[in-house]
């Protein structure tokens, strides 16, 4: 979990408070399996730019509220991807898995 404000969490969960990109890079490098990260656009953008992420799963739901936020924040370069899986969960949710090239 990445947060500057959340209290310490339970056993098996680490709260990352500073230097999130480098700490996540280290976690991914040392992992013996997949690392699942639920993150917002700013952190995802930083991780894509430094090449930490291999896949991105977008969970898309139909919501009509406000103006919304951009998916990724101002990237300094381009990221190419390939859609590898799509699954629909009616009535209004779709999971899209992209492999980052």
Image (tube, rainbow, N blue to C red):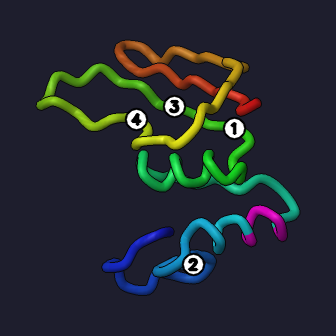
Q: Choose between 49 and 11: the one closer to the eye.
A: 49
Q: Quadrant of residue 66?
A: top left
Contact between marks 4 and 1 (CB within 8 A): the answer is no
Going from the N terminus, do you reach mark 2 or mark 4 first? Answer: 2
Going from the N terminus, do you reach mark 4 or mark 1 first? Answer: 1
Indicate whether 67 appears above or below 83: below
For disc 2, the marked residue is 14
Q: Quadrant of residue 83?
A: top right
Q: CA distance from mark 4 to mark 3?
A: 9 Å
Q: Secondary structure at mark 1?
A: strand
Q: Secondary structure at mark 3?
A: strand
Q: CA distance from mark 2 to mark 4?
A: 25 Å
Residue 55: mark:
1
Q: CA distance from mark 1 to mark 2?
A: 22 Å
Does residue 29 show up magenta in the picture?
A: yes
Spot the residue most to the left: 66
Going from the N terminus, do you reach mark 4 or mark 3 first? Answer: 3
For disc 3, the marked residue is 58
Residue positioned 44% across, 39% down in the render? 72
Residue positioned 76% across, 30% down in the render? 101
Q: Secondary structure at mark 4?
A: loop
């Amino acid at each position: 979990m990445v947060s500057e404000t959340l209290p310490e969490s339970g056993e098996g969960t680490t709260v990352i408070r500073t230097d999130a990109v480098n700490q996540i890079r280290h976690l991914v490098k040392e992992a013996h399996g997949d690392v699942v990260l639920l993150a917002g656009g700013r952190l995802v953008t930083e991780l894509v730019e430094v090449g930490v992420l291999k896949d991105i799963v977008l969970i898309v739901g139909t919501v009509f509220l406000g103006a919304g936020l951009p998916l990724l924040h101002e990237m300094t370069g381009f990221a190419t991807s390939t859609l590898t899986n799509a699954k629909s969960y009616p009535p209004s949710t779709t999971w899209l898995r992209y492999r980052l090239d």
